[in-house]
Amino acid sequence: MFIGEYSHNLDDKGRLAIPVKFRDQLKKGAVVTRGLDNCLFLYTKTEWQKLAAKLAALPISQANSRAFSRLMLAGAMDIDVDKQGRVILPEYLRKFASLKKELVLTGLYNRIEIWDVKNWELYKGQTEAQSGDIAERMGALGV
C-alpha cells in the first residue's frame, strides 16, 4: 500500500529517487503512464496488470472508452528501480506532466502519483478549499 507525500528532485537525466518506503513494492518492476489532473501514475506490475485488464475489457465501440484506454495504455512504459532507488521517467511523460526539477510523489493506495511541485500545490489548495463539498458527495458513495 502506498500512502504519504514526499518531495524529491528530478535530475538532469530524468532520474527520480523513489521514497525508501515505496522501493520494496517496486522491486519486481513498475509501469509509469499518463495520469489524470496533469500528473503521472506509477503502478507495481501487479496493479498495472489489473488495470490493463479492465481497460482491455472496455467496449471499443464507445469513444470515451477508446480515448481513456489510449491515454493510459499508449502512454505506459515499463521501468525498473536501479540500485540507488531511482527510476528514469521518459521525456514524453515528463513533458506531459510538465515536470521540472522539484517533484512531489503521493501515495494513493495502489499507485504513486508524480507531480510537479507547483501543479501539486495548486491542485492541493483547490481540493482543500472544496473539501466540505467533496466530503458531502463522497458520503453519497458510502465513504
Image (tube, rainbow, N blue to C red):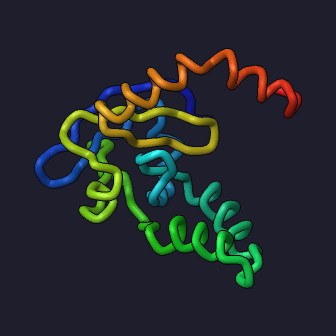
Asked if residue 134 is positioned above or below residue 35 in the image, the reply reads: above
Q: Residue furthest bottom?
A: 61
Asked if residue 56 is positioned above or below residue 122 in the image, the reply reads: below
Asked if residue 76 is positioned above or below residue 129 in the image, the reply reads: below
Residue sitting at x 27%, y 57%: 95
Residue 94 position in % (x across, y down): 28, 55
Left/right of residue 133 with respect to residue 7 in the rendered view: right
Residue 27 position in % (x across, y down): 47, 50
Camera-nearest residue between 76 and 141: 141
Camera-nearest residue between 64 and 85: 64
Left/right of residue 115 with respect to residue 108 in the rendered view: left
Residue 101 position in % (x across, y down): 18, 39
Work out which quarter of the rendered image holds the C terminus and state it: top right
Work out which quarter of the rendered image holds the N terminus and state it: top right
Residue 73 position in % (x across, y down): 53, 71
The mark tally for this picture is 0
Residue sitting at x 85%, y 33%: 141
Residue 133 image-quadrant placement: top right
Is residue 48 among the parts visible in the rendering? Answer: yes
Camera-nearest residue between 22 and 71: 71
Left/right of residue 54 with respect to residue 97 in the rendered view: right
Residue sitting at x 48%, y 45%: 37
Residue sitting at x 46%, y 25%: 124
Is residue 83 among the parts visible in the rendering? Answer: no
Q: Residue furthest left?
A: 12
